[in-house]
Image: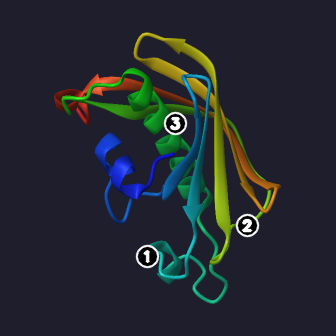
Amino acid sequence: MLDVREILKRIPHRFPFLLVDRIVEIEGDQRIVGIKNVTVNEGFFQGHFPDHPVMPGVLVCEAMAQVAAIMAYQVGGDSNGNKVFVLTGLDGVKFKRAVEPGDQLRLELVCLKRRGSFWKMRGTATVEGKVVAQAEISAMEVPIQGVGSR
């Protein structure tokens, strides 16, 4: 449903931190499915077990969070670029299998709760139908000037 050009219009992430190649399903504010093609050219493989490259689990979680942000922006996020969705929490994170070059990650997120600018979703990442990671992801929309402020 959304290719990388459309994704770039919806979330602020750019190389090397854009971790979503396309969105293949969106069901309003309830469910979304994204795809990440994992290639040996990814920058993190240079330093993360170079002789046996494995995608860092934290980046699998980040990819799920980016898909979640795409749904949130699609449904009602700020289209003026004055706000951004930021990750506020990860719960119940489980890594089940390694993600290697050549794998295609299927990132499915289901909305558990939505209140105002706050979202909580359950994410599942699979490769060839096998679960590689799961997490509950919380995020909220904040003004850009509030990002990184203490």
Q: Position of residue 6 (x, y in %)?
A: 36, 48
- The picture quadrant where one finds residue 33 is top right
Quickly name the residue at label 3: 68
Residue 120 appears in the figure: yes
Q: Report the amino acid beneath label 3.
A: Ala
State which tag comes first along the sequence, 2 or 3.
3
Residue at horizontal 55 percent and vertical 82 percent from the top: 40
Q: Report the amino acid beneath label 1.
A: Gly
- Which secondary structure, mark 1? helix
Residue 98: which numbered mark, if any? 2
Q: CA distance from mark 3 to mark 1?
A: 23 Å
State which tag comes first along the sequence, 3 or 1.
1
Residue sitting nearer the eye, 30 or 119: 30
If the image is split into quadrants, where does the C terminus sit?
top left
Q: Is residue 14 above or below residue 142?
A: below
Q: Is residue 18 above or below residue 115?
A: below
The number of numbered badges drawn on the structure is 3
Coloring basis for residues: rainbow
Q: Are marks 3 and 1 in contact (CB under 8 Å)?
A: no
Q: Is residue 32 left or right of residue 4?
A: right
Residue at horizontal 29 percent and vertical 45 percent from the top: 9
Quickly name the residue at label 1: 43
- The picture quadrant where one finds residue 26 is top right
Q: Position of residue 125 (x, y in %)?
A: 69, 50
Q: Are marks 1 and 2 in contact (CB under 8 Å)?
A: no
Q: CA distance from mark 2 to mark 3?
A: 22 Å
